[in-house]
Image: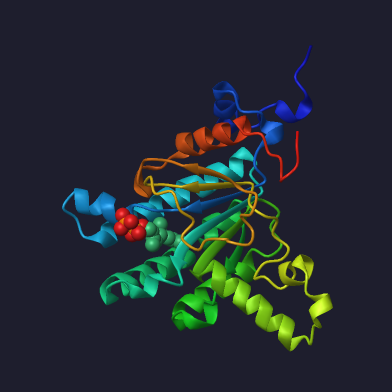
Amino acid sequence: MSEPAEQTPTNEIQEQAVRLGLDLSRLPQHVGIIMDGNGRWATQRGLPRLIGHREGYKTLRTVLLAANDLGIRYLTVYAFSAENWRRPQDEVRGLMDLITQAATDELRIMHQNNVRVLVAGRIHEVPEKLQRALKKGVETTRNNTGITFTLAINYGGRAEIVDAVKQLVRDGASPEEVDEDAIGKRLYLPEVPDPDLLIRTAGEMRLSNFLLWQSAYSELVVMPMPWPEFSTEALLEACLNFQRRVRKFGGVV
Ligand code: FPP
C-alpha cells in the first residue's frame, strides 16, 4: 500500500523526521519554547552570560527555520519575561540590544522563508528602538503564509490575563458576560491557537509564567540540554515524544 499523501516528505528535515518515526500528519500545530540555560551554558565555560544569549540566538535561528521546513504552523518563544527586568542592568541592556539586532538582521531571511512574525507582551514598555524593529518585522511579514513566529517579549502569563480582564472591564462586560471565550478573545494574540507542545530546555520543570492561559492542555517536554545546545534533532525528538502522548483534554479516550 502507498503512503498517505501528507506523509510524503518534501524536504530534508521532513525526510529526517520520517526516518526517526515521526508522523508528518500529526505534528504539533503550535510549539512553545522556554529557551532556558543560556546563562549556565556560558558560566560553565567561564564566559559572560551574554555570550550564552548570543549562542542562544544562533540556536533560535536554526530551530525556527527547521520548524518551518518541518511544517509546524506556529512557534512561540519566551525571549524576555516580564520578570527578567530583575536581572543585572548590563544583562538586561545586552538582551534588549541582542533582540533588537536579531529582529533587524534576520528580517530579510525570515521574509524570504515566508515566516510571519508576531509579538506578545507589554511591548510599549521595551526600548523604542526594539519597538520599531518589531513593528517593522510584523508589518513586513504580515501576509506571509509559512510558520507564524511569535516573540514573547516583556511577556508574563499573569500580566496577559490581567490585561485581558482590564479590557473586559473597559468594554463594560457584565458578570454574566465573563466567560472563557470573553477572556480568550482579549488575550494578546487571540487568533493564535493554544500550544499543543511546550518545550523547556535545561531541565527545570516549571512554566515560569509562560502562556499560562493557553497551556491548560499543552503537552510538556522538558529536555536536559541548555538552550544553546538545542538542535533540529532535539526538536524532532520532542515532537516524537509529543506523538507518544495520549491527549484527553479532561475526557476519556
Ligand atoms: C533564559 O536563559 C533565556 C533568556 C532569559 C533569554 C532568551 C534569549 C535568547 C535565546 C537570546 C536571543 C533571543 C532572540 C529573540 C533573538 P537564562 O539566562 O535564564 O539561563 P540560566 O537559567 O542558565 O541562567
Q: Residue furthest right?
A: 176
Residue at the spot x=77%, y=27% of the render?
Answer: 5
* For residue 113, side relative to residue 130 (left or right): right
Quadrant in which ligand 1 is drawn: bottom left
Q: Residue furthest top?
A: 1
Image quarter (top left, top right, bottom left or bottom right) of the C terminus? top right
Question: Image quadrant of residue 143?
Answer: bottom right
Residue at the spot x=66%, y=28% of the render?
Answer: 23
Is residue 137 at all visible to an observer of this figure? no
Q: Nearer the viewer, residue 236 or 186?
A: 186
Q: Nearer the viewer, residue 80 or 73?
A: 80
Q: Nearer the viewer, residue 251 or 168?
A: 251
Vertical arrangement, residue 49 with respect to residue 251, above or below: below
* For residue 127, side relative to residue 173 (left or right): left
Is residue 63 at all visible to an observer of this figure? yes
Q: Position of residue 118 (x, y in %)?
A: 61, 65
Vertical arrangement, residue 111 with respect to residue 186, above or below: above
Q: Position of residue 205 (x, y in %)?
A: 43, 48
Question: Image quadrant of residue 137?
Answer: bottom right
